[in-house]
Image (cartoon, rainbow, N blue to C red):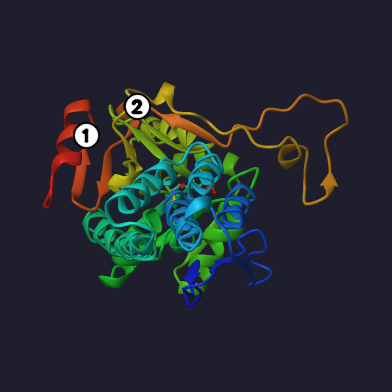
Amino acid sequence: MGVDTLRWTGKTLQLLDQRALPQKIEYVICRTATDTAHAIRGMVVRGAPAIGCAAAFGIALEATRPVALDAAFETLAHSRPTAVNLAWALARMRRALTLGGATTLENEALAIFREDLAINRAIGAHGAELVADGARIMTHCNAGALATAGHGTALGVVRSARDQGKSISVVASETRPYLQGARLTAWEMVQERIPVTLVTDSMAGYLMSCGEIDLLIVGADRIAANGDVANKIGTYTLAVLAQRHGLPFYVAAPRSTFDPAIAQGASIPIEERPADEVTGYRGSRWAPEGVAVRNPAFDVTPAELVTGLITEVGVLRAPSRAGVAALLFRTSGSP
Ligand code: MRU
């Protein structure tokens, strides 16, 4: 992509300000865990794996102030509720602190970051096998390099398929209300010179009915023990449409996005975001004052609508509780 989503300098965490994209490339500098939590809550950095990496570095920023560490864990844990990678990364940092002390925190955060990049390349390699030459891939939100340490999950599959020499193209849904598809996925694909067509969310069914989509690949924020998937609002709608039109619907995610403690999708906490994201955009308002608004940022796609979960250890087809348990247990290979 030519631009880093997260940069660690040893003393600061520099986050590409995703609120400003695609108009401006700017970095927000975090010097404390509180700065980092503020950046996560404010959407400077977003996307489940990137949020996890940022939180880990946020803890590392407090390594020289051990008395502040408990408060740092607490503040970061409450920065956003749905992506489980946040809690997963904090648990890893807590374990490193307990076993090795505060001096190990920087190395653990760097390990989480580097592993995420390697994991995404493995996801890409497994997923690319599912993509035929010439495929037209619909994706939703942004599950790309901007949402991870690099390469991406859903867009990692796209990149890997392209790297295999396949002539693929992407249809990006705009992703109302926060426009991650229009602003971020479209930008990533343009940077990579991967053919991309932007559509509004409501055009998806029409395109599928016209035979203009071959498969769908999205990311995930949390996957329950039974394979239900929480991802960006609108994902469930796309999965239902995909089933209606007989199209494969894949979810690409690392195993750090699975939450075996959550039995089914209905128990996943769904973030409700501010009303002004729905009533207007960046200061301009189009809805009348006094209107009631709902703004759930994620929805849950039942496992039965998911053709396969693409992970770093392989593709779990027709996800089930037993399949997910086996997948989380594996050390390598195909589930
Ligand atoms: O609200 P966001 O932008 O953090 O939501 C991001 C998504 O829903 C992504 O699809 C998901 O985190 C996977 S990112 C690899």
Question: What residue is shown with label 1?
Answer: 324
Instruction: Say which label, 2 or 1, has the lower sequence index.
Output: 2
- The reply, left or right, for residue 296 in relation to residue 10 is right
User: In terms of depth relative to the viewer, which is nearer, 149 or 31?
Assistant: 31
Where 202 falls versus 154 (above or below)?
Answer: above
Judging from the image, what secondary structure is the residue with disc 2 in? loop
Q: Residue furthest front?
A: 67
Does the residue tagged 1 have its C-beta within 8 Å of any atom of ligand 1? Answer: no
Looking at the rendered structure, the kind of residue marked 1 is Val
Query: Between 62 and 53, which is closer to the camera in this rendering?
Result: 62
- Residue at point 51%, 74% (across, down): 3
Query: Please, is residue 187 above or below residue 294 in the view?
Result: below
Q: Which residue is mark 2?
A: 262
Residue occupying the point 51% across, 73% down: 191
Q: Nearer the viewer, residue 92 or 311?
A: 92
Q: Is residue 134 left or right of residue 315?
A: right
Mark 1 element type: helix
Residue 319 visible from this viewpoint: yes
Residue drawn at the location 39% of the way across and 26% of the way down:
265
